[in-house]
Image (spheres, grey):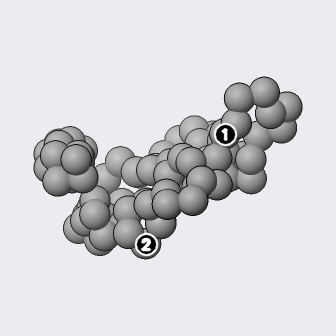
Amino acid sequence: LFAVVNKHLHELLALHPYLPLMVLANKQDLPGSCSITDLHDALSLSKAGDRRLFLIGTHVRKGDLELSSGVQDARNLIFQMVSDGR
């Protein structure tokens, strides 16, 4: 599965070489989830080009009233990039 995602991701990245990339690694609270380091390697993110890159571990549980810190970080980064006009 990662090989297919990796291929398509890098095809899209090649079309827009300077856009930032944010990857949310959900389900980080579950045993056996793919680690951030393993996900970085599986998606070959070191080859993502000269762009701002964010790989954020998250978890979202149905019924939670508060966002996890990873989701909050992602939201804040998106707000910051939009307000900076990047």
Q: Earlier in the sequence, mark 2 or mark 1?
A: 2
Residue 28 in view in this figure: yes
Residue 83 % position (x, y): 63, 40
Q: Amino acid at mark 2?
A: Thr
- Give the residue displayed 45% in from the left and 50% down from the top: 23
Residue 34 % position (x, y): 44, 60
What residue does disc 2 label?
37
Q: Quadrant of residue 66?
A: top right
Residue 72 % position (x, y): 72, 46
Residue 54 in view in this figure: no
- Give the residue displayed 74% in from the left and 47% down from the top: 68
Callout 1: SS: loop
What residue does disc 1 label?
60
Q: CA distance from mark 2 to mark 1?
A: 20 Å
Callout 2: SS: helix
Judge left or right: residue 56 versus residue 22.
right
Q: Amino acid at mark 1?
A: Val
- Give the residue displayed 24% in from the left and 52% down from the top: 2
